[in-house]
Image (cartoon, rainbow, N blue to C red):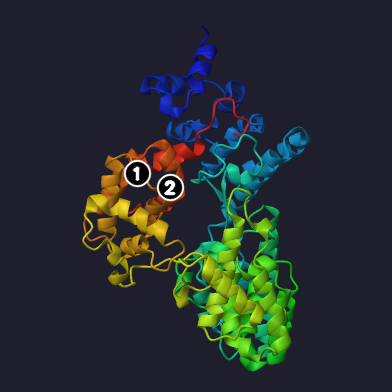
Amino acid sequence: MSDTQTAREKIRKTPGNATDFEREQLRFFLSQGDLATTLATLNPSLAWLPVLSEMKLVENERQLVAWIERNFADATAVRDVVANLRFFGPDTANLLEHYLSAQAERLPAVLVNSWRLIIRQMQAAREAWRNEWFAIAARVRRGEKSGELLERIAEVLRPKLRVSRSLSFDGRDTEVLEHPRQLMSIDFEVDDGIDGNEVISAWPKDAEATTDARLLSGLTDALITALEDATEVGSEGDEGYGVSDSDVPSVAEHPQNQYRTGFHPIVRVIAELWERLSAKSSKLAILFVDRWQHLPFRLTRRLGLFACASPVVPVALAAGALIALPQGELFLTGSTVEVVRLLRARWNEFELEQRDVILHRICEGPPKSWYRDDVDSAKHIDRARFDLLGEMKRSGLGLNTEAEALLEDLDARWPQWTLRPAEQAGFHMWMESGSRSAREGSAFEGVPDDQLVVEATRVAGEREFSTGDDWHTLCLNDPDRALHGLEFAAQAGNWPAGLWHQLLWSRKEYRENTTEPRIAALLLQCPADSFGQIASEASWWLDEHARTLESDSLWPLWDRVAEGTLAEKPESSRG
């Protein structure tokens, strides 16, 4: 066998399957002659990228371009390059863009779009070195109001596309590759991790109303640009949850907004600035409400609903915002938070005819088309109507005959349902830090740890949608004990995904110093099928605990999440 054939056989292996001796043979072979030509000729897996860097073989990123170009049709190569974007910059991006244009007509559209996202990230790589907010903050505090400065503020806050290695298991069994999200994580982030509070605190409170309006207009334009981008790449849409729903739990200031990035900073600056403007010039402020309501984005409609809760907005405009809102957004997505807030603030001001129209829409419930075919949509629609009508009644908001009759019918058909706590109304996800009373977890008082999971499963079955989610409360107040229960269940071969989800999401500090490493150890022992159901939560937990986990737990768990994400079926066209 020739040296070339030998090298080809060795390099076909993944780095994890190659021995140290084979790696050294490969290093020696690739160090002979022109690296770019050798890589393009042998065409190994792009998973070797970091290994080649460790071997000190790559002198210039351009040496890798021809190799990547040869793999444009390989979905696995997309994942490998995304996982190693740190090696590339605009030089590679410009060359790849040229080569991709020449091949685009021969490639599947989803791969073309995936490579274009990668190229965008490479082009932006060298722009991240400068802290733009640091450069302009002093000028903002001095009260400068030039058009150039306002544009730079808006640009600092505009969420920008970021692609990265995916740690999600979504689509891992999909035979047909349909979207770049199956190959990479697609997010929108602000530069420098800027906090919106920094910007709004620096902006002079005594700025003229027209100056506030100029900045607000620029911020709205920047938000539109980001939402158009997110819509184009499939992260936002007309139905279902989008990236803005997870980034912005509440447009108004709220504890649930803690730790949020992405679209959150610009939305909070817009909301705070609008409230300042409304106190200075209601006329100018109302113009923005009308504009936001007529834009084709859920997040701008949420801004409009937020503003409509203010008494400076005419009551007809506020009622009209609820009447014109897409039906699904009354009940689902992040919009429900603003719907509940507006109803509580302005309901008693609405005309009776307006109330009847709104209540009729609520009685109709969310569209069935918003639910997957494999779920009991009728039950979920009932639950959505129950939550919103029940909250209105609890808040003392008058219901008409139609709404009262429906609520009575729902109570009769679903007697086990109870409303969530009033502070959670409208929120579809609720993150807590363990502040709820331990009394709420009293269902487990006296229950042995080895029976915790059995009892939690029984209670959950009896209290569907209940506010008294005892296991959730146990995880918030005593995650150490929750882990004990899950350990006993694991020993019996039981890995309940729903219970693991809540433990992994809990931010409560552990009392036992062994809890963190034991969770990591269990996640490593979890059977593959069960791990696939909790992988997203495991990824989040790992990110939260990466700084305190010992390396002998951290890196094996990281590898497990990554390997599961990148695992493919033989002969799969998914990539």
Residue 392 lies in quadrant: bottom right
Residue topped by disc 1: 523
Residue at image position (68%, 91%) is 282
In the image, 441 versus 208, the foreground residue is 441
- Report x, y in % for residue 408: 56, 74
Mark 2 Cα within 10 Å, few/some/many (few <14, many 20+)? Answer: many
The reply, left or right, for residue 457 in relation to residue 444 is: right
Q: Which amino acid does label 2 sit on?
A: Ile
Q: Is residue 554 visible?
A: yes
Q: Give the SS element for disc 2.
A: helix
Q: Which amino acid does label 1 sit on?
A: Leu
Residue at image position (48%, 45%) is 167
Q: Can residue 550 be seen in this view?
A: no
Mark 1 Cα within 10 Å, few/some/many (few <14, many 20+)? Answer: many
- Report x, y in % for residue 249: 53, 69
The quadrant in which the C terminus is found is top right
Q: How many marks?
A: 2
> Contact, CB < 8 Å: mark 2 with mark 1?
yes
In the image, 411 versus 511, the foreground residue is 411
Residue at image position (50%, 70%) is 195
Q: Give the SS element for disc 1.
A: helix
- Report x, y in % for residue 414: 51, 65
Using the image, determine if residue 564 lies above or below residue 145: above
Residue at image position (53%, 17%) is 8
Counting residues from the start of the chain, the first of labels 2 and 1 encountered is 1
Residue topped by disc 2: 534
Residue 368 lies in quadrant: bottom right
In the image, 290 versus 88, the foreground residue is 290
- Report x, y in % for residue 13: 48, 23
